[in-house]
Amino acid sequence: MEFKKTVIRTTFFALFCVAIVSCDSDSSQKQDTQNRTLNFFDLPKTEQDWYIKKDELDKYGEYFTVDSYAKNFNIDDNQSIEGSIDELKAQIRLLREKNRLLFEDNAQFMNKNWAIMTKLREQQNSFDNEKKLINAKNLEIMNDVEKQHYKNINDLTKKINEVQKENLLTIKAYEQKIVSLENQIDTYQKKLQQSALNFDDKIATSTKEERLKNSDLAQKNRYLLEQIESLKKSMAFSINDLTKQIEEKKIRENELEQSILQKEAKINDLLASHTNEILELQKKNSQDLKDLKNEIVTQKKEYFDELNLKSSEYLKLANEYENYKKDKQKEFAIFQQNLAKTYKDAEEKKVNDIKNDFLRVIVEQNATISLLNARISSMEAKFRSDLEAKDKEYAKSLQALKDKALFIEQNENRLKAEFDQNVSSFKQALKQKDVKISELNAQIQDLIKSQTDGKMIKNYEILNEDITKLKLENENLKKFSEENLQKSKELVLQKDKDMKMELDKLKEHYESIIKDLKIGDFNMTSTSSLNGKKSIDEIKCELKDNAMTKECQSKFNDLLKKYGAEATYEIIALIPEFKHIDSSQTALLSSMELRSTTSIMSLASEPLKSKFGSKLKIVYAKEIKFEKSGYGFLIRVYK
């Protein structure tokens, strides 16, 4: 706007000068002026200071600035107009040239602004495309990581299920050892019961003899008890006499105290009644008062002497009672010691006799127990060797699981490294964008310095708004990228944590199962064989709450009644079919009621053994059958 005002003022100034010059009638001066060539330096010094040549624009920069415009193009309206028509025409031509230069500069500004806007749009489009590519790549990486994670967990779960099936197949080999040990334990228990019966008989005979011996001691004890009762009665009589004497003495003491109190009351009454007389007599005759006081003191002394005498008699009687009581207690203690000594001697003799018999029996039992311990030690050595072999197999399988888990962890670390690398490249791209934005800001600052008119200011404001929007979008993109990165890291960490928890649960569960299998690592020995025998009948029973149902018990009893102890019975364990358990169902493992085939066979053989005893022919099958219904057993009859 200032520039337009300047042009208008200059135009009016030129027209005014032309009008003045046209009115001038001096022809000689007019002719002389037309023959001269007007240049810039012909202008007055004051006019030259108001203008600036194109060649001198470089000292202000490539374009006009606000300061240079204010300094060089500010025209004072009150200044007088000087110069001829030619000079004014020359000034107009100069102004036209300056206007043309300014128009060209403005066109250059517009072209540069348009180029900058085009460049910014291209950068924005490329930035948006890069943003979409990075988001798509991050999403693809996360999907690949998640798929690989679930695949690793599924493979590990399948491997664990295979190990579980292998363990179930090896259970039958462990359970065959139980029957022989149970039979040996039964024989040991029978021997111990027989030895206990013999020991009870010996103790009964020895106690009968001791009862006869103790009858005399009982009579002596009764006599001693009668003597003790008589002594207690005599002591009670003496104690009653002493208590009566003490009560009589207390009565006499009370009487003496009452008499003393009465005399003191009389004395106090006399003192109170004759106080005034004593005071008057004291004034008259102090000697009589002293005599009266001496008499009163003498009477008090007599009363106190009598009281002290009674107190000494009471203390003497109390000392006599205490001495008598101590003597009686000493006599009673001596009597108790003699009685305890007599009873102790009799008891020691009785205990020594029983102890000798008991030691003899213990020596016999120790000999038997040493033989049993030797047999048990040999069995334990064999059992330990088998257990060590199973421990080695378990350690190998556990090491394989650990190697698998280590491979999974290394794979996840590799994926994390790739993800971090992609994130770092994305950050580097953002830094490059920041550098470009800084360059644009520098160009904008240059444009701010070179703005000269309202149109340029408007273009600058539009450009500045676009740059602000671009910065805002860049900040939002940074925040979105950081949030996406944080969420991705949290998701990976949560997946790692969940997988480790699931692996720990599976490991603890299978370790507890293997531990239970080791604890129940016994043999079950068959008492017969099936060589040359044919199956004639069979029954199948289901177990509920680790017990046979009523229907199963009735079928079992009918089978025993029908074939009796002459037939051979084969027991086959039935277990449920195991299904594949994926990572989402690991919580079901703790709720599954897993039972060993040993417990099933023991439950089936107990009714047979209780009815027919050791004569029964039992065969424990090495095979295991799978049933959909659950745990149970199958009994086949052979002849």
Image: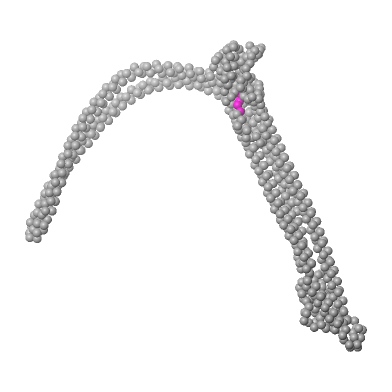
Q: Main secondary structure of the magenta part?
A: loop
Estimate the x, y position of residue 87 in percent, counting from the top left. Answer: 86, 81
Where residue 4 sits, quadrant-wise, is bottom right
**Residue 85 showing in the rendered view:** yes
Please tell me which residue is depicted at 60% across the width and 21% down the height of the picture.
601
Estimate the x, y position of residue 259 in percent, counting from the top left. Answer: 14, 44
How was this image coloured?
one colour
Name the foreground residue: 567 vs 140.
140
Please tell me which residue is depicted at 23% across the width and 28% down the height of the picture.
233
Find out whether residue 597 is within the magenta segment: yes
Query: Relative to 324, does residue 56 appear above or below in the rendering?
Result: below
Please tell me which residue is depicted at 78% across the width and 55% down the height of the picture.
124
**Residue 529 showing in the rendered view:** no
Estimate the x, y position of residue 105 in percent, counting from the top left. Answer: 83, 68
Find out whether residue 102 is within the magenta segment: no
297 on left or right of 418: left
Please tell me which residue is depicted at 71% across the width and 37% down the height of the picture.
151
Where residue 623 sits, quadrant-wise, is top right
327 on left or right of 288: right
Q: How many marks?
A: 0
Query: Relative to 328, does residue 182 appear above or below in the rendering?
Result: above
Estimate the x, y position of residue 287 in percent, counting from the top left. Answer: 8, 57
360 on left or right of 295: right
Q: Which residues are magenta?
A: 594-598
Name the foreground residue: 613 vs 313.
613
